[in-house]
Image (cartoon, grey):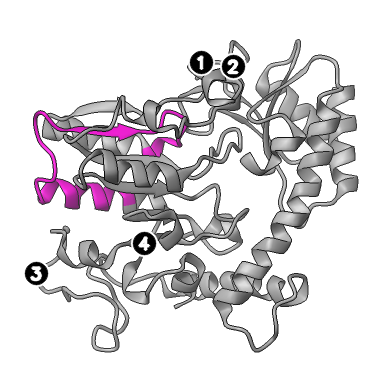
Amino acid sequence: LAMADFLGCSQEEVAFGPTMTALVFHLSRALRNGNMLGPGDNIVLDPISHGANVWTWMRLAKSAGAEVRWLPVAGEAAGASALDCMLDARHEALSAVIDERTKLVAMGAASNGVGTVHDIAVICAAARDLSGGGALSFVDAVHYAPHGHLDVAKIGCDFLACSPYKFFAPHAGALFGRRSLMESLPIDRLDCSDDSLPSDASCDMSRWEMGTQNYEALAGVAAAVNYLAGLGSRFGGAAEEATRRVKLEAGFAAVSAHENELKSRFLAGVADIPGVRMLGVAEVSRRSHRTATFAVTKEGLGAQDLAEKLCQRGIWCTAGNHYAGFWTSQSGGLAQDAEGMTRLGLLHYNTLDEVDHILSALEEA
């Protein structure tokens, strides 16, 4: 019930697994088992996405003899910078890759590498309309989930996956799927396993869940969702007697307001640091198009070298490609796929003073 409230769906439409990656492979096998695509068909993927939302589907396409196409990346014609790493959601751009032979459109809600937020509701609608209803839509919401309120009905997706550990729960994966699909797709399962969706009769187990679940982790997932709902009461103005879903919406409104302040301070400050470049949406006025995750580089320093210098200043950050393969093609020469960039991630528990400390460390590195 907690994840159903988190995602805005029914309990029957949620399944758990060990990781988001494992669940995506599980879903891809179900699509393969159902002969959902074959020679002459195509799938359309997100070039900015984490590898779990790319390589999994590429393996499916290869096994089915289907074509792989790529969602377009926005440029000046879409009112974006080439360094924004943003998907182009204009109809004319999407109609060049989605057609009546498209069977799947898979996209990320936000880039785990650079923080850019994509217009997934528009892309999901286009997937349905341009394919004549023949394409399923899948959203990787792993990176977006700790930063923004999720509502699968408003997004209009067929499937959405996320990793609760990203929003302060233990390691686990969660999958939303439209009920009709969760009921009908031919999943890999044991013959002795229950073949229904969660209910009292099935002990709240889904036909998508293989074997005994990690109930310790699931208890932590529920606790994390309750924590986020609690932010709605403490900081978002939600009444104590409000439903958990209402509290979650209020909580994420408070999270968004605070993270907007963090983003504004960082974006305004980093633009003035000599030798530092950033990939992703850079304008304060467009901060709603990104999370508070920043990919940066500094002249004369490799990604790992810069990360080590920041860590020495008490700033935990990472360096690498973060399992994404867009750096060489989309960074304008700032990074290569093998090395990636230094990544800084801020959340609602960070402060403006901490942002100032990061900016100072970047300048002195």
Q: Circle 4 sits on which residue?
A: 176
Nearer the observer: mark 4 or 3; the answer is 4
CB-based contact (under 8 Å), mark 2 and mark 3 = no
Q: Which residue is drawn at 67% across and 24% down?
A: 304
The range drawn in magenta is 24-53
CB-based contact (under 8 Å), mark 1 and mark 2 = yes
Q: Who comes first in sequence, dot 3 or dot 1?
A: 3
Whether the magenta-drawn stretch holds residue 303 is answered as no
Please rate how many residues cluster around mark 1, counting C-alpha atoms within 10 Å: few if below 14, some from 14 to 19, many from 20. some
Whether the magenta-drawn stretch holds residue 47 is answered as yes
In the displayed structure, would residue 226 be above or below residue 276?
below
Q: Which of 133 and 71 is in front in this view?
A: 133
Q: Can residue 338 be seen in this view?
A: no
Q: Who comes first in sequence, dot 2 or dot 3?
A: 3
User: How far is mark 4 from mark 3, CA to CA?
Assistant: 23 Å
Q: If the image is split into quadrants, where does the C terminus sit? A: top right
User: How far is mark 2 from mark 3, CA to CA?
Assistant: 49 Å
Q: Which residue is drawn at 47% across and 30% down?
A: 88
Q: Residue at x 66, y 69 (%)?
A: 250
Number of numbered discs present? 4
Position of residue 72 measured from the top left corner of the image (x, y, whole percent):
41, 25
Q: Circle 1 sits in a helix, a strand or a loop, which is it? A: helix
Q: Who comes first in sequence, dot 4 or dot 1?
A: 4
User: How far is mark 1 from mark 2, CA to CA?
Assistant: 6 Å
Q: If the image is split into quadrants, where does the N terminus sit? A: bottom left
Nearer the observer: mark 2 or 3; the answer is 2
In the displayed structure, would residue 301 be above or below residue 3?
above
The dot on residue 191 is 3
